[in-house]
């Protein structure tokens, strides 16, 4: 290993150490406020924003929610998500390919946590970089759409291995793309044996009630000391 | 900016400088051998491997080809690509989210360049990290599938801005996903005004002849001095 590689790695470790410390603060803060914080990871276009649009439409009244959404460029997602009355804060990451705990901490400062039950952290669309950045979430959700191919869990194991919950999205397209469900589920279980797996479609509504039930079941007991 | 950030950036610059030097060597070597080297970038699941499978099936005899394929894990893609008689070399990148020029250089050493017309460099599925690593290619191809949403060029401009050619893939699914072609093309042209745009489907074959024509038109004059 070259000197440059060793230096790069030691700086990466410092970056991750700093991130973990801030993630710990975020997690404590969310916990104190009785907030479920869900970190959503996927490829670009797997349907994170569409999932959250449907989720806010159907649950924002019973579970007041906010979204912190990371993108390299544009605030399109925050605009889409703002329609349902929830606060949506766009974090423009420039050329950084993931949210980090510090970005989340600064965005959280703009939220009235006492009025909220859920904060969704919609990560930058990427199956690699976001996987090693703890944001202080209590629920990590990985999405994979039926259009991406059944092999994705094996090719990008880091994205799925640490997920508490895996959503197989766009199942309304399963027949059109010749989705091999058995292979996909086998591959997911191989990489992430303990994760709960749900099959959903934001468009048809299939499986969405189960997703909402899972969210409700994960809400922490409230202590309300923001 | 903190001292750690400045150090991180200066090391990144060193990494990119080293990469550029090796990319230059690769480009010279490909040029000397009359090889078209095409770097393919996209999200995971946009259809790079399916495109290359169809391309090898239809053109490997007229344009002898090899593929260097990058993945975090697994050699599934090389196995899929090997079926058509082309050499497919898998580069397993571990936790590195892109190919770099050095990985390509080491893989190229295993190829008989004198017998080849085209070397495809199938990058790791990722719209962020691969964009800033020149591999020594003469053609950069960005793929975006109709299932990913029309906004992707605006959200991940780096992936499209430097592309010579953009392939809109899976157009056989355009109707099923309600693909808004006009918006997608407008967004692509906004980010990448000079790139050629083709709409293709590896499954139905639509647009594939145009893609092959583009490849043929890009073949350099041969000098055969490997």
Image: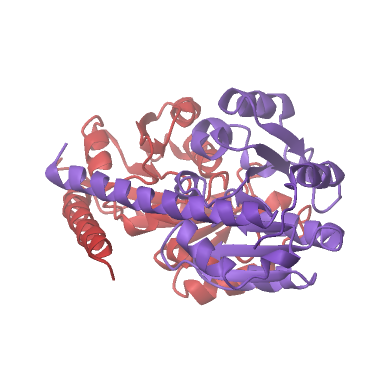
Chain colours: A purple, B red
Q: Quadrant of residue A184?
A: top right
* Residue under the point 21% across and 33% down: B109
Left or right: A214 in relation to A127: right
For the N terminus of chain A, the quadrant is top left
* Residue under the point 31% across and 56% down: B138
- In-front residue for pair A100/A187: A100
Q: How many marks?
A: 0
* Residue under the point 44% across and 29% down: B78
Vertically, is A53 above or below B98?
below
For the C terminus of chain A, the quadrant is bottom right
Residue A112 appears at what percent x and percent y?
68, 70
Residue A122 appears at what percent x and percent y?
61, 57
Residue A203 appears at what percent x and percent y?
82, 54
Left or right: A65 in relation to B110: right
- In-front residue for pair B216/B37: B37
Vertically, is A7 above or below B82?
below
**Can residue B96 be seen by looking at this rendering?**
yes
- In-front residue for pair B220/A180: A180
- In-front residue for pair A15/B172: A15
**Can residue B180 be seen by looking at this rendering?**
no
Left or right: A109 in relation to B165: right
Left or right: A221 in relation to A205: left
Residue B200 appears at what percent x and percent y?
60, 53
């Amino acid at each position: 290993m070259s000197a440059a590689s060793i230096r790069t790695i030691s700086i990466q470790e410092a970056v991750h150490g700093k991130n973990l410390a801030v993630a710990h603060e975020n997690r404590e803060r969310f916990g104190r406020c009785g907030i479920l914080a869900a970190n959503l990871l996927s490829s670009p276009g797997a349907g994170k924003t569409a999932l959250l649009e449907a989720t806010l439409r159907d649950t924002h009244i019973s579970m007041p929610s906010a979204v912190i959404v990371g993108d390299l460029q544009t605030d399109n997602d925050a605009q889409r998500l703002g329609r349902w009355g929830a606060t949506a804060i766009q974090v423009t990451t420039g050329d950084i390919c993931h949210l980090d705990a510090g970005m989340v901490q600064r965005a959280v400062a703009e939220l009235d946590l006492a009025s909220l039950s859920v904060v969704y952290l919609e990560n930058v669309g990427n199956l690699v970089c976001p996987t090693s950045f703890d944001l202080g979430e209590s629920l990590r959700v990985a999405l994979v759409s039926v259009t991406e191919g059944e092999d994705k869990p094996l090719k990008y194991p880091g994205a799925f291995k640490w997920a508490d919950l895996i959503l197989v999205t766009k199942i309304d397209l399963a027949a059109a793309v010749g989705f091999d469900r058995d292979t996909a589920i086998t591959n997911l279980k191989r990489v992430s044996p303990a994760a709960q797996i749900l099959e959903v479609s934001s468009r048809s509504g299939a499986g969405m009630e189960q997703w909402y039930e899972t969210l409700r079941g994960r809400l922490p007991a409230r202590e309300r000391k923001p």
